[in-house]
Image (cartoon, helix red, strand yellow):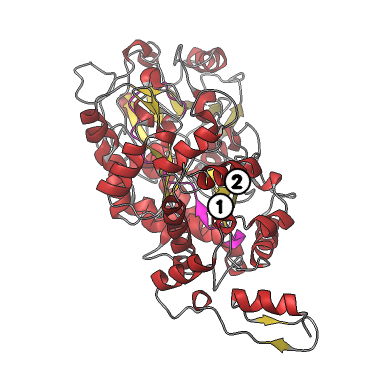
Amino acid sequence: MFSSSVKARLLASGVLVLAALGGPAWAEPAPYLDPRPSVEDRVDDLLGRMSLDDKLGQMTQPERRFVTPEEITRYGIGSVLSSGGSAPSPNRAEKWADMYDGLQRAALAGPLRVPIMYGVDAVHGHNTVVGATIFPHNIGLGASRDADLVREIGAATAEEMAATGVDWDFAPCVCVVRNDRWGRTYESFGEVPALAARMTTAIEGLQGEELGGAASVLATAKHFVGDGGTEGGRDRGDAQISEKELRAVHLPPFRAAVARGVGSVMISYSSWNGQKMHRHRYLINDVLKGELGFTGIVVSDYKGIDRIDGRPGFTRDEVASAINAGIDVAMVPTEWRRFIRYLRDEVVGGRVPMSRIDDANRRILTKKFELGLFERPFADRAYLKTVGGAEHRELARRAVAESQVLLKNDADVLPLDDEDKIFVAGRSADDIGMQSGGWTITWQGEPGPITPGTTILDGVRKAADPSATVAYSRDGKGVDESYDAAIAVVGEKPYAEYHGDRTGGLGLDAEDLKTIDRLRGAGVPVIVVLVSGRPMDIAAQLPRWDALVAAWLPGTEGAGVADVLYGDADPTGRLPVTWMRDAGQQPINQGDGKKPLFPFGFGLTYDD
């Protein structure tokens, strides 16, 4: 039935196969394919069967657009990723599952049948998938102070990911933001290490009680380490701080993540006192793997190895220095073949020891066995009903309500009465894309109806009595003194990473200020709802506003904002960062002696 060469290959791999014709063909199962031995024994057995090329393939992570199924089989690729906005067409959960299963079949067609892992940045829900539930960004969750809520959100995200087959989440970001000019400020839970460490419950939600559950995905603590402490708040910049400060401020959340069993850690683009993290052997190998006892996968950031010497592309020296520093999986989206070639040359030439290659593969394969990928390699379509489902959207709505921070409430203008005549204005009032921010469907995010959800305006209309008037004008035109109050929903346009760095002013733009002025001109109480990824420079305008609510970036469930505005939920959020008096105070943090507009931990309630 089989040629002698095919039989030899089957026997060498120890795989039980079904012949396409003529019934079953039997080979003695290899121990690593038997779920009964320990993970350690299975890894040992598989490692003993792998060639150098097999091992290099496992350490290589291309982007989905730049690798074919045939290449996954031929090179033994270990994992694939979707970068921000990279999705199948049409962008629907079912199509993701089809794509994942197709790539997985290609991996399983290899002689050793080692499954791939598939990674995405699901940083506030399964946020690249149209129709998925989009939760508040981390800064809002930090305001909630609710670690149990964050665990629930992690579990809900894992279910929606399981539906698509995606099993590796490049989240949570456990950075500690120390300068709000940083374009990743909203990816941080807050400015103090204890708060970021507390919210590592997200890991438990994503991974479950242990890896391998029905909806269990590999979590990633990122970005190791100090990315929130760079000079000027520049993304991918240099943290010019002492080791004492690095350890006191930026390391504790990673220590907490390792204690919670996080499966992977991503290295930061940034530097520490001039040395790139992607080649920092002391911090990766000695501190993370040695001192903290991390046994999982260390993964580079997107093209992170390319940036070690500051020039485009990567060299053999950059590859060797990154792998020797302790990086196990290289995110090399486009030039992955060259990465394999260079790394092979460095191993053969003795510049990267084989022990380092074996250590990386042991870490990778251990997580694949623990995830149960050898037994259950395909998407679990039973979870498709959870993608954007009512239960998850209700959880997101609750998270939005808990994240609202009431900063000003003169004359108790809030909560609104559901019979009040309300005028709503602002470019973020009726825009899912604006209220969701970056990392929503696309990398940078964008305004508009980019995915299903409830806008803040929708939420206000639903919270109001059916007989009450709720008028809307984006620019505020049409408001008059007949209204009981006006709500201005203003803030920042979507952005991500370095695109969001703000080295100049941190104020509202002219359109937002003009809208608020129109509302004020009507002589009615003005409530400003600030949709932003960080504190804004609003001290000069604040005296002319009757109320101010920091809504952060709430995601798709804008009804949670309305719940607080109308008193259906109490404002319980507390500032996760210090609110500057003016942009010139940046960086400003708890305990630095500067006088803020609002201190870390501030937040009013309706009882106040």
1 is higher (above) or lower (below) than 81 = below
User: Label for residue 3?
Assistant: none
Q: CA distance from mark 2 to mark 1?
A: 6 Å
Q: Which residue is mark 2?
A: 340
- The answer to whether residue 468 of the structure is visible from this angle is no
Mark 2: few/some/many CA within 10 Å (<14, 14-19, 20+):
many
Q: Which residue is more in the foreground, 355 or 231?
A: 355
- 290 to the left or right of 555: left
- The answer to whether residue 223 of the structure is visible from this angle is yes
Q: Quadrant of the C terminus?
A: top left
Q: Quadrant of the N terminus?
A: bottom right
User: Residue 174 appears in which quarter of the rendering?
Assistant: top left
Q: Which residue is mark 1?
A: 56
Let me know if residue 463 is in the magenta part. no
User: Residue 336 appears in which quarter of the rendering?
Assistant: top right
Residue type, mark 2 in image = Ile
Sequence-first tag of 2 and 1: 1
Mark 1: few/some/many CA within 10 Å (<14, 14-19, 20+):
many
Extreme bottom residue here?
23
Q: Main secondary structure of the magenta part?
A: loop
Exactly how many numbered labels are in the figure?
Answer: 2
Extreme front residue here?
349
Determine whether label 2 and label 1 are within 8 Å by CB: yes
Q: Secondary structure at mark 1?
A: helix
Residue type, mark 1 in image = Leu
Query: Residue 158: horizontal and vertical position, in percent?
Result: 49, 58
Q: Which residues are magenta?
A: 163-183
Query: Residue 88: horizontal and vertical position, in percent?
Result: 71, 50
Q: Which residue is more in the foreground, 11 or 584?
A: 11
